[in-house]
Every structure is written in C-alpha cells, then in structure tokens.
Image: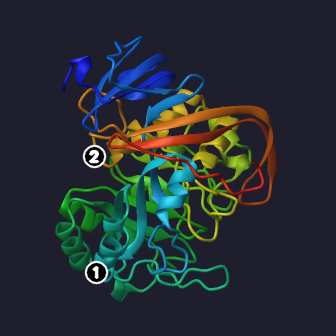
C-alpha cells in the first residue's frame, strides 16, 4: 500500500473510527489512495493537494454489510431497488437471501447486480424457482414442494456464479416448508456441503421447532430471524434462552437478526440480550412489505438493537467484520491498509424515539443512527433522506 502521504487522494478527518476487526474505537483520520485504505491514525500528514473530508462528530466505520435483503426488484413482487435503500441506510454491501434459485439466478445477476454501484452478493435458494409467491395475502412455500428441491441444480448454479454466490438459502416453517419440513434443510445442507459454503436458514412458525433446526446446522451456518416472536422464539415463557441456542453457538452456528415483516420481537431481543445472548449479525431482511416499516432498512434495525442493549461498537461489528467473515470476504468489513475503501459515515442523534417491532409492540429509545454518506472503493455516494415518520 502507498505510504507516501503526498500520493494520497483523500483523508476522512477527525471522526470516531470504529473498526472492530482491528480493535479500533478512537478519534482518527482515514487516508485513501486509489480506492483502497492507505493509513489510519491520528493527525495524518496533509499534503497540499490531498482532499479533506471533515468527519468531526461522525462515526466512521467499514462499509456496512446487510447480509439479509431481498433485492430482485420487479422480478419478484417483494423485491426492492437496492440502490436507494442502501443510500438511505449507509450500506455498501447487500446480500440477497434466496430470492432466486437455480431457475432464475442468472436474471438476478444480469438485471440487478450488473447495473448497481453497490457490492452485491447472494445466497442461492435450494428451491429451483426461488421465492416465487410471497405477498401480504398470498404465500406459496417454495420449500414445500419436494420436486423443486434439486441439489444438483443448486450446486451447478453456485459453481457457475462463484464470484457472487455465498451460500445456500432455505426457508423453514409451516408456511414455507410445510409438511416436508426438515427434508428441505437436509437438501440445502447437502448442496452447501458439496460447494463448501454455508447454509442460511429462515425459521418461521413451527413445525419444525427452533431446536430441531439448530440440531442440524454446522459451524459457519446461519440461523436468520434469531429474535423472532413466539411461536419459535429464542426464549421460553420465563424469558430464558433455550439451551439449543447456546449449544449451537458453541459449535460455531451464527445467529442473524433478519428483521423483516414478521421476524423481530422486542420481548425476544431484550430477554436474550439481558441473558448475555447477543446476535452475531444484524440484518434488515428488507423487502417491499417492510421497507416502509417495521424494518425499514439496516440502519433502522441497528438503531433498534442498540436501544435493546447492544453496545455501539458491538453493533458495528455485527454489520461489518462478522458478516464479512461469514461471507468469506476478508477484503471487506475492515479498514486495514490495502482493504477496499468501503466506508460508512454515521451520525448519532440522541433524542426520544418510538420504535415498533413486528407484533406492533413499541418501545421508546434514546438514540438513532443516520447516514451521512458512504464511500465505495473510495468514491463518495451522497445519502438519501430516510423516508419514514421518524425524521
């Protein structure tokens, strides 16, 4: 990496730099050269030609990663346009969580990924058509039809798109896998094992149960919707974390928020966090049915978790370094010299604010996060206003 400050392109100056991968939480400057991080430190030298971007009062983090989104815009009824959602939430990397399967994954790549300035990745759905019938009034579970769960087709699709395919997605629950239940998970794990990638599994209303799903998952696999409300909550009626969660975490299973339209409850979140069971990853599960609430986007979801008791530095890790490791993308999620200059600029606003979960329960928080722009490969992208009633 170029260490000569005379050749740097930009310095983001004087922000609170939080980079959990490198153990940083301090006031510092971040220097950029040719789209990559050149240096991080206090009072970096300024040459006469280097551009200075004042970050005083802002939090400077690695570019935020939303590991669970649905961005197959216009090809699926629930897909959202990734670009405006990312710009309003300070997100740099968005991962589509199984909108497409083997039968239509190429379209997701050609029509969405290849036209966006964002860093976009995807899980391939074990079901051949992906999530093809999902709306407020109409749901057909794509994992409920045995004939659609082709391991061979899923494997071939991952192999054909190795640069963007990060794992295999399966949705389990009464409305998604129906009577087939665990067969869908078994086939997803078989496909993922053959390509050496993790499974991300959705947990819905039983069957199957939380414990049954976790018992099958391997180190590195992700359980999304981890703080969903009952039924299939992570805590029992007394508010204690289920033993199956702790056992799964000990063997390396990762727990992801995946807020969405129906999968985040304050009771589950607060009780689990108070018992010392924080999520590993925060994600929005943003789609057309929750982009205007209750999830909105990644930054809104982060704000909720912080107001439920997650520390700010921990929350940053949950949307930067940890998802980067889960995706096996070490070039993202950190501000190490030589890493891609993907950066999120955030502002904290300290004022009372009412948040809602998916059950309609509300809680008054004291802090929220706003984006003040992102850099993707060193190129600055202006933020969009966040179009919801909290502004």
In the visual, does 47 lie left or right of 171? left
User: Mark 1: few, some, or many residues within 10 Å (few <14, many ≥20)?
Assistant: some
Task: Decide which of 302, 348 is in the foreground and name it.
Answer: 348
In the visual, does 320 lie left or right of 149? right
Q: Which residue is mark 2?
A: 328
Residue at 27% x, 60% y is: 164
The CA span between labels 2 and 1 is: 25 Å
Q: Quadrant of residue 168?
A: bottom left
Percent position of residue 306, x then y? 64, 36
Give the label, 2 or 1, closer to the camera.
2
Q: Is residue 208 something one can see in this rendering?
A: yes
Q: In the rendering, which numbered label is found on residue 88?
A: none
In primary-sequence order, the first of circles 2 and 1 is 1
Circle 1: element type: loop
Circle 2: element type: loop
Residue at 26% x, 18% y is: 5
User: Mark 2: few, some, or many residues within 10 Å (few <14, many ≥20)?
Assistant: few
Task: Decide which of 98, 276 is in the foreground and name it.
Answer: 98
Percent position of residue 197, x then y? 26, 56
Number of numbered discs present? 2
Above or below: residue 61 compared with residue 391: above
Percent position of residue 172, x then y? 49, 69
Above or below: residue 326 compared with residue 24: below
Percent position of residue 29, x then y? 42, 20
Query: Which corner quadrant holds the N terminus?
Result: top left
Q: Which residue is mark 1?
A: 150
Task: Report the coloring of the rendering.
Answer: rainbow
Above or below: residue 104 compared with residue 349: below
Residue at 69% x, 61% y is: 293
């Amino acid at each position: 990496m170029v260490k000569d400050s005379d050749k740097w392109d930009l310095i983001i100056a004087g922000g609170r730099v939080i980079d959990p991968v490198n153990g940083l939480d301090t006031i510092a400057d971040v220097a950029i050269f040719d789209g990559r991080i050149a240096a991080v430190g206090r009072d970096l030298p300024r040459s006469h030609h280097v551009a200075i971007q004042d970050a005083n009062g802002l939090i400077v983090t690695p570019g935020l990663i939303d590991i669970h989104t649905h961005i197959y815009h216009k090809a699926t009824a629930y897909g959202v346009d990734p670009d405006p959602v990312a710009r309003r939430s300070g997100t740099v990397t968005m991962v589509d969580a199984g909108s497409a399967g083997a039968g239509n994954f190429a379209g997701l790549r050609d029509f969405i990924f290849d036209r966006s300035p964002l860093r976009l990745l995807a899980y391939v759905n074990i079901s051949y058509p992906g999530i093809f019938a999902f709306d407020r009034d109409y749901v057909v579970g794509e994992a409920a039809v045995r004939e659609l769960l082709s391991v061979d087709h899923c494997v071939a699709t991952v192999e054909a798109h190795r640069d963007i395919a990060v794992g295999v997605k399966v949705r389990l629950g009464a409305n998604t896998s129906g009577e087939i239940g665990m067969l869908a998970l078994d086939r997803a794990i078989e496909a993922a094992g053959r390509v050496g990638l993790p499974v991300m599994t959705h947990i819905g209303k039983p069957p199957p149960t939380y414990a049954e799903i976790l018992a099958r998952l391997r180190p590195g696999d992700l359980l999304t919707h981890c703080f969903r409300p009952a039924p299939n909550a992570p805590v029992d009626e007394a508010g204690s974390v289920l033993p199956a969660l702790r056992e799964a975490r000990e063997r390396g299973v990762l727990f992801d928020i995946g807020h969405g339209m129906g999968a985040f409850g304050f009771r589950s979140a607060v009780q689990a966090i108070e018992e010392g069971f924080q999520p590993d990853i925060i994600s929005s599960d943003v789609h057309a049915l929750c982009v205007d609430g209750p999830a909105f986007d990644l930054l809104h979801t982060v704000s909720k978790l912080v107001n439920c008791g997650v520390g700010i530095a921990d929350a940053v890790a949950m949307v930067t370094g940890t998802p980067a490791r889960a995706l096996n993308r070490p070039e993202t999620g950190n501000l190490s010299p030589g890493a891609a200059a993907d950066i999120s600029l955030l502002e904290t606003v300290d004022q009372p604010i009412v948040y809602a979960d998916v059950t309609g329960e509300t809680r008054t928080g004291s802090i929220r996060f706003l984006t003040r722009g992102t850099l993707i490969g060193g190129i600055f992208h202006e933020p969009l206003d966040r179009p919801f009633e909290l502004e």
